[in-house]
Image (cartoon, helix red, strand yellow):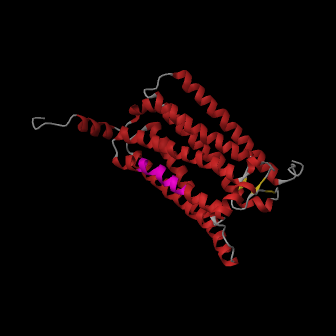
Amino acid sequence: MSSLVWSNPVAIWWSFLVAVSSANIVFWLLLYRYFRTANRQSDLIRVELVFMLCAAYVFGCAFRSILPRADIQRICLFDMWLSSVFVGRSVATVAELCFAAQWAIILRLFAKFTRSDTVHNIAGAIVPLIVLAECCSWYAVITTDYLGNTIENSIWAVAFLLVAVALLRLLKEFHSIARVAIAVAFAGIIAYLSFLALVDVPMYFDRWQADQESGKKILNFLVGLHDVSTRWVVTRDIVQWKDEIAWMSLYFSAAVWSSLALCGISLVADRLHHYRADSTRARLRSHTYPRTPLD
């Protein structure tokens, strides 16, 4: 801890991560307390599941904020076994799959309300896509091949492009505050996709190209698995961390806030029918009670 002093920009950044993560945990606890005392949901099992998935993401991101690391570089801030890439990547995998499952549940809920096949199909595609992304991530981490990270983040982009399509489809189905909330979520995802396309994916692709040009050899599976479990390099040098700061800061703040927001949506799901657009109400009535020739 001696070199992690306030004169070091890395210390300021790390303090930001810890503060944001602490606030996220407090907010989750408050939301969960409200859920446990409200007792007015029509589907308690679904809401409980969304909250548990969110807890895995919130606490997983908090763990990664307190003990940040860069996987392929094998760098971390603190010299302890919990800083190993194997531990950190395992926590990240569970957290990210839970985050994807949250989105799938909420989109399926909206698909049921609006009877939209498009939204329903997108909801079913989210988790498989993220499972594939996690496999690419593990390949990159074990072999130190940045091509895996490039593909991983490209798959995340595809997954959330589909989510954006689903939200755009849902915009016309609701009015008032529900439409505003969907529009805000859509705007946030467009910002996220822009970051992936302009910053994150090009960064990993450039690293992969640099490794190719330098003739770097990737690790085979067994050697890489041992390396990822036993080697970590402690550094507080801003030069080593500068390329990680942007995505980590956004990931451990805005991404977690979106997970918390999904909990909020699950809490008010039984009120969604109040915000259906008139055209949607008419279509649903027609679908439920089809007209006869005499009508």
Snapshot quadrant of residue 206: bottom right
The stretch in magenta equals 122-133
- Given the current orientation, which residue lies at the most extreme front position? 222
Main secondary structure along the magenta-highlighted residues: helix
Say whether residue 69 is left or right of residue 46. Answer: right
Residue at image coords 49%, 58%: 158
> Is residue 229 or residue 293 the one in the foreground?
229
Q: In the image, residue 114 lies at what x, y percent? A: 35, 40
Question: Which quadrant of the figure contains the C terminus?
Answer: top left
Q: Where 166 falls versus 174 (above or below)?
A: below
Q: In the image, residue 32 lies at what x, y percent? A: 58, 29
Task: Report the number of numbered marks.
Answer: 0
Q: Is residue 195 visible?
A: no
> Is residue 180 or residue 291 the one in the foreground?
291
Residue at image coords 31%, 40%: 279
- Given the current orientation, which residue lies at the most extreme right position? 2
> Is residue 169 or residue 14 the one in the foreground?
14
Q: In the image, residue 59 lies at what x, y percent? A: 65, 39
Residue at image coords 70%, 58%: 226
Q: Where 65 falls versus 49 (above or below)?
A: below
Residue at image coords 43%, 30%: 271
Q: Is residue 228 visible?
A: yes
Snapshot quadrant of residue 110: top left
Asked whether 51 falls inside the magenta stretch, the response is no
Say whether residue 272 is left or right of residue 88. Answer: left
- Given the current orientation, which residue lies at the most extreme left position? 294
Asked whether 125 falls inside the magenta stretch, the response is yes
